[in-house]
């Protein structure tokens, strides 16, 4: 089992319903029909081959999700494949393209199987669907750039990179997933498994971008060029890319971790809420969303303490009345002090280099919660919250989580 993976954070951080089938026109295109408060959805498809899909619109209420499956029928008279297992259907295979990357070790190659709800589930190691080993940062198409009617468009030569990529030094990049189920199950069953699998991957690897996106390495700013008084390009296209420094806790998914995660699907086990929120905070900081990062760091701290005290109650080391007294009021720093006093510990004195950053997070959290611009006291001066303050908060909260777990 994965166990208490968060104990190593501080040390490491130092350095559906399947649609009805119907005939589909050979060259037919159906578009979505939008309305309020409900959304009417038709399959959108265009192909030189035969397709099957929903012909009639399906009503989707606000917040509901619907899987729309479109099935190509193939070419009449095509030869049957020579399969080793025959043509008898034994289950189904679901394939996922991920909006983020998972980094793995080279030894991760074999699938792993677990039985869930009388269903054999085989999960293959994440694989690379992309054409490039590195994530490609697309460039602006020069022929699509708007320009003034007084000037010449910027697409007058080939002085632009076709693509750009940056390395990420923790393993081999993967961006897709295969899961087989036998006997066959609906898409929602596979979706729930994949959601939990990816959350466990996030926990085990501490790759905080898993389940989110590539925002930490993909900037909206892609290109730049010099212009004259008419806005005409007078230089080459310059390309922009962005990267983000790792905290030292991140590690690639290896064979041992992969097999452990698949086993944990049967328990069932999921990533603790405070760690999930802590990783969200790192991701938010990586995309320069400082206010969100502060709120998530504060929430992670609060949930971690509540969880730890609840576990103490379950083990008979604390009663409900004592826990209620510790958590009385709305001042988390007071909660922290009371919890430490009860167990003979003190985070402020045991981690004097990290406590000020935790306090900064909570002061800033209060300002944000009341609609104010967050500020901090830096060298005796009141200054606006900056990226460096949130970095210090991320490191400090990682230590705080470990300290809370040691109570």
Image (spheres, rainbow, N blue to C red):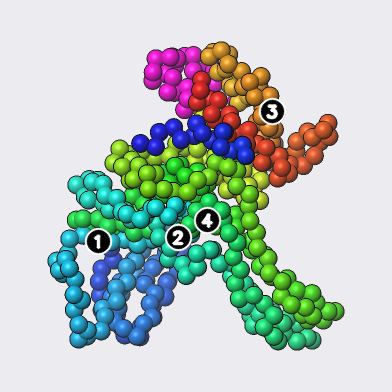
How many badges with numbers are in the image? Answer: 4
Q: CA distance from mark 3 to mark 1?
A: 54 Å
Q: Is residue 379 above or below residue 276?
A: above
Residue at image mark 4: 213
Say which residue label 3 marks.
Answer: 353
Secondary structure of the residue carrying tag 1 is strand
Query: Closer to the observer: label 3 or label 1?
Result: 3
Identify whether 316 is placed above or below 112. above
SS at badge 2: strand
Ranked by sequence position, the earlier of labels 3 and 1 is 1
Region of the chain picked out in magenta, as a range: 307-330
Tags 4 and 1 in contact by the CB under 8 Å rule? no
Instruction: Tell which of 171 and 30 is nearer to you.
Output: 171
Tell me which label, 1 or 2, sits earlier in the chain: 1
Give how far across and how far down residue 112 sits, in percent.
Answer: 29, 50
Tell which residue pokes out farthest to the right in this image: 229
């Amino acid at each position: 089992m994965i166990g208490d993976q968060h104990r190593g954070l501080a040390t490491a951080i130092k350095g559906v319903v399947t649609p009805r089938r119907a005939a589909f026109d050979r060259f037919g295109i159906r578009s979505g029909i939008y309305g309020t408060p409900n959304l009417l959805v038709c399959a959108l498809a265009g192909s030189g081959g035969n397709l099957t899909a929903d012909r009639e619109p399906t009503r989707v209420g606000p917040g509901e999700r619907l899987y729309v499956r479109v099935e190509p029928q193939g070419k009449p008279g095509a030869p049957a494949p020579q399969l080793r297992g025959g043509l008898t259907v034994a289950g189904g295979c679901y394939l996922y393209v991920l909006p983020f990357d998972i980094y793995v070790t080279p030894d991760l190659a074999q699938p792993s199987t677990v039985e869930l709800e009388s269903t054999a589930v085989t999960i293959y190691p994440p694989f690379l669907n992309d054409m490039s080993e590195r994530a490609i940062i697309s460039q602006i198409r020069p022929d699509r750039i708007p320009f003034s009617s007084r000037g010449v468009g910027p697409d007058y030569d080939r002085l632009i990179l076709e693509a750009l990529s940056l390395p990420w030094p923790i393993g081999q990049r993967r961006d897709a997933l295969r899961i087989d189920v036998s006997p066959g199950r609906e898409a929602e069953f596979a979706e729930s498994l994949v959601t939990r699998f990816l959350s466990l991957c996030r926990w085990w690897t501490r790759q905080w971008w898993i389940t989110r996106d590539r925002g930490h390495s993909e900037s909206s700013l892609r290109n730049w060029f010099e212009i004259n008084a008419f806005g005409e390009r007078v230089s080459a296209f310059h390309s922009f890319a962005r990267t983000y420094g790792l905290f030292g806790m991140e590690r690639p998914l290896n064979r041992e971790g992969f097999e452990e995660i698949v086993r944990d699907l049967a328990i069932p086990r999921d990533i603790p809420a405070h760690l999930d929120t802590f990783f969200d905070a790192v991701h938010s900081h990586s995309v320069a969303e400082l206010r969100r990062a502060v709120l998530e760091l504060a929430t992670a701290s609060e949930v971690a303490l509540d969880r730890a005290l609840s576990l103490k109650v379950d083990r008979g080391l604390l009663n409900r009345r004592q826990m209620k007294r510790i958590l009385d009021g709305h001042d988390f720093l007071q909660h922290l002090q009371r919890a430490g006093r009860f167990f003979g510990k003190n985070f402020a004195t045991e981690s004097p280099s990290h406590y000020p950053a935790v306090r900064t997070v909570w002061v800033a959290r209060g300002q944000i919660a009341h609609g104010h611009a967050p500020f901090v006291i830096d060298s005796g001066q009141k200054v606006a919250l900056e990226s460096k303050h949130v970095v210090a908060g991320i490191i400090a909260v990682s230590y705080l989580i470990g300290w809370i777990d040691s109570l």
